[in-house]
């Protein structure tokens, strides 16, 4: 991490699981955090609150089988007050983001939920998390504003934009085909090619009400905290994470 930091002008961070296979105790996680933060400029850690299992299970199973241990994350806040920690893993909507923040999280990373259902997930962030007025924009208006920015972006970052809506599956197929078509040069031409399969009622509707989530997701986490970490004087072993 020191080498990376020496070659960039921006702060560096580490994203890690809470453990790997049998190396999954809270003290081992703390040993890792302590050594990295002590021997490098790294002061920000994104903590995926599951351990990684490297014994042959699939990446998909690694995202659901190891149990979530949010208490490890909140214990890190207690034991490393000079560092910044972002919580990740199993947080699927804005309600749950706010629940984590109310419990004291420094920041929240939402991964697949935002990617898979980005309209209903991200459209509420500015108002529900940051207190900004709702824009009231429809999908069509968002897409119109996106065109200028999107011409500089490769790939298909809108793959979850019509999640669970009529025409979504066909739109994804047309979108994938359009990206392989060398005649599609701009986002405008991409939209003209693909949006014909999405009903006007979907394009012209504003974002739905804020989806409800598990507001009590972290309600009992303080009662589960492991004992405080005591820095060990012996050599700390740094382990890899998936």
Image (cartoon, helix red, strand yellow):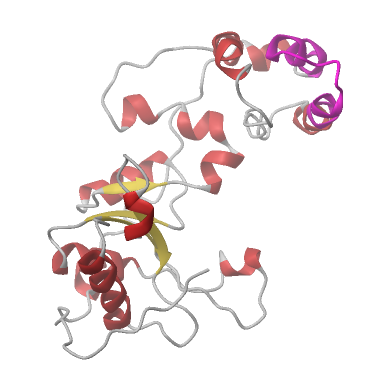
Q: Main secondary structure of the magenta part?
A: helix
43 lies left or right of 118: left
Q: Is residue 207 above or below residue 212?
A: above
Q: Is residue 83 above or below residue 106?
A: below
Q: Where in the figure is residue 149, as x and y percent of width and height? A: 55, 16
Quadrant location, the N terminus: bottom left
Q: Where in the figure is residue 7, as x and y percent of width and height? A: 37, 47
Q: Residue at x 21, y 47 (%)?
A: 102
Magenta-tinted stretch: 174-197
Q: Is residue 53 magenta?
A: no
Q: Residue at x 60, y 19 (%)?
A: 150
Report the number of numbered marks.
0
32 lies left or right of 210: left
Which residue sits furthest bottom?
234
Q: Residue at x 67, y 80 (%)?
A: 56
Q: Is residue 196 magenta?
A: yes
Splitting the image into 4 quarters, where does residue 125 fall? Answer: top left
Q: Residue at x 30, y 43 (%)?
A: 98
Q: Where in the figure is residue 234, as x and y percent of width and height? A: 21, 91
Of residue 15 and residue 62, the one placed in the foreground of this image is 15
211 lies left or right of 56: left
Q: Where in the figure is residue 231, as x and y percent of width and height? A: 16, 81
Q: Is residue 155 above or below residue 42?
A: above
């Amino acid at each position: 991490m020191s080498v990376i930091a020496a070659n960039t002008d921006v702060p560096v961070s580490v994203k890690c699981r809470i453990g790997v296979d049998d190396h999954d105790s809270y003290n081992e996680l703390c040993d890792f955090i302590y050594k990295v933060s002590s021997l490098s400029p790294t002061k920000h850690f994104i903590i995926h609150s599951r351990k990684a299992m490297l014994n042959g299970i699939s990446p998909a199973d690694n995202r659901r089988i190891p149990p979530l241990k949010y208490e490890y994350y909140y214990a890190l806040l207690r034991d490393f007050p000079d560092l910044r920690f972002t919580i990740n893993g199993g947080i699927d909507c804005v309600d749950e983001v706010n629940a984590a923040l109310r419990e004291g999280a420094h920041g929240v990373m939402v991964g697949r939920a935002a990617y898979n259902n980005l309209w209903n997930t991200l459209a509420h962030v500015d108002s529900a998390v940051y207190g900004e007025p709702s824009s009231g924009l429809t999908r069509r208006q968002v897409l119109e504003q996106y065109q200028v920015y999107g011409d500089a972006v490769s790939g298909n970052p809108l793959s979850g934009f019509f999640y669970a809506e009529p025409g979504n599956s066909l739109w994804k197929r047309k979108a994938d085909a359009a990206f392989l078509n060398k005649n599609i040069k701009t986002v405008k031409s991409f939209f003209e090619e693909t949006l014909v399969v999405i009903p006007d009622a979907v394009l012209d509707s504003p974002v739905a009400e804020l989806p409800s989530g598990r507001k009590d997701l972290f309600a009992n986490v303080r009662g589960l905290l492991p004992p405080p970490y005591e820095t060990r004087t012996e050599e700390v072993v740094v382990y890899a994470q998936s």
